[in-house]
Amino acid sequence: MPLFEVNASADTACISTAPVFAKVAVQLDGKSKSHDASWWALMEHNVGRLPGTRSSWAISAAWFAFLAGVASTALIPVPSHWGFFIAILIGLIFSSIWLPDHGDTVLPFCTIIILPIVVFKSVAMGGLWSYSILLFVFVVIPLADFIVGVDVGNQTREIQKELHTAFRFELLTLLVAPGILGCLCYAAWLANSGGLSLLEFGGLSIGTGIITGVVGIVAGHELCHKASRLERVLGRLLLCSATYGHFYVEHTLGHHKDVATDHDPATSRYGESFYEFLPRVVKGEFVNACLIEAARLRRNGLPWWHNEIPVYFLVSAGIALALASLTGPLAVPLFVVQSVVAVLLFESVNYLEHYGLERRELKPGQYEQVQPQHSWDTACRVTNHVMFKLERHADHHAHAGKRYQTLQAYDSSPQLPAGYATMILLAFFPPLWRMVMHPRLLAHRLQQVGQVFRHGPSPGASLPKLPSTPSCCWSERPEKAGERSCRTTPRRAAPRE
């Protein structure tokens, strides 16, 4: 199954760059996701919204005014008006609770500009305030997720197809690449300006890593799943800006095929703490990427110098050296530290996206099709806007070629109680993580009637297995001889261009 695939079936949609818009019953097309009592949220947006509802010009104007207000906070002088800056920015974020979002305007996703504003204003404040981005990400954002609430709205199949081709959404992700490079340049200039203490240099490096980890790698991940050569080139560049270019190879041809199996290093297992998962996933993704690339070279009869893995590290080194030549030698340690922070943050996201979820092994080496129950979803609106709807992860894994603006929320996918910022914070404290997640995971496993799990308890294994019925979102068809699909999980990955 080549990475560049213009057609996809139900069996190959989880690894193809071709978009698949699942056919559903007429009464379910565009239907909002049902309420989930486990959500930590005050509000639910788009409950009972009529299918096909679109944003009016007034809604777009309101979002534009909101973004203008956010951008204008960058003009507030600090440290003289630091308290005013913080109050205005937090007030604006919480005020977004009153802004409707029907999913057809790109403006809500432009809230990514908040992160660099906070990072560089914090460094300008100096001292311990240089680390205030940590308070923003792990205190303000979780509170915003709780207060602003969840978005349960879905789009009809026809609107999904229409939005998929809307260039405004693609343009935003394309602009992230020069934006991230600009942030790296500015951060490197600040580091070499001579006005920062070692403490402030650490705050700047961590803050820059949060920018590249939350915005850069997430946008790079989105771009790497697309068929356009420009998008995939910029996606790899964004990954290289965090020294994680090999993720492109392993994620698209390893993780998406092997997810929720023991072959996948990026699927965290029942009872595995984040600190046990982190070294396993970092090593496993690198090793898998090398194996995938080596298999490609053997298959195509190419010499060793066609291996792309070293190229990605050379690009990362080139970015660091270019920054150093433009701004000064401190750009190199800044680049290294921000890369470590970005990878740490992104792998913490990987940890929670599939924790304890497993696909049934139908026979040795062959697993059931990737379905909604194999990814944790969350409908929190604020973090979904900042992370290009990565939190609607079940649909992304089932239909990898769909653009972020068309991802849907399924009733059948297990639900995280809060957004990624909150859950990452819990993951850093394993007892809290297990206290929150294990009851939810066991309740979900109880619904998987007859399944014996490879890790942890199997509460539904002794229950009688019900006759299987076709899913409304994943139509079945026989596999052709020799065809690769998301069901088969060999130790060598699918071919790549």
Image: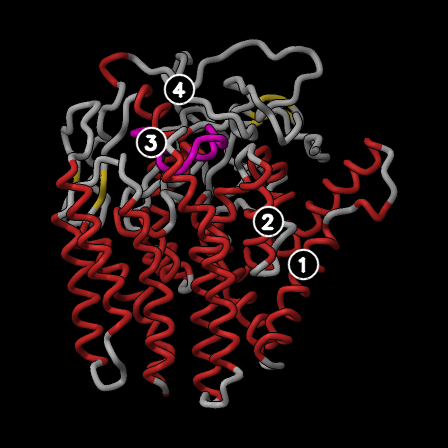
Is 121 on the left or on the right of 294, as rendered? left
Looking at the rendered image, the disc whose residue lies closer to the viewer, 2 or 4, is: 2
Measured Cα–Cα span from mark 1 to mark 3: 35 Å
Query: Identity of the amino acid at label 2?
Result: Arg
Q: Nearer the viewer, residue 223 or 270?
A: 223
Identify the residue position indicated by label 2 in the image. 236
- N-terminal of the pair, mark 4 or mark 1, is 4
Measured Cα–Cα span from mark 2 to mark 4: 28 Å
Q: Is there CB contact under 8 Å for labels 2 and 1?
A: yes
Query: Identity of the amino acid at label 3?
Result: Gln
Q: Position of residue 231 (x, y in %)?
A: 54, 41
Secondary structure mostly seen in magenta is: loop
Position above or below: 238 against 378:
below
Measured Cα–Cα span from mark 3 to mark 4: 10 Å
Query: Identity of the amino acid at label 1?
Result: Val
- Asked whether 163 falls inside the magenta stretch, the response is no
- Asked whether 403 falls inside the magenta stretch, the response is yes
Query: Identity of the amino acid at label 4?
Result: Ala
Identify the residue position indicated by label 3 in the image. 408
- N-terminal of the pair, mark 3 or mark 4, is 4
Q: Quadrant of the C terminus?
A: top right
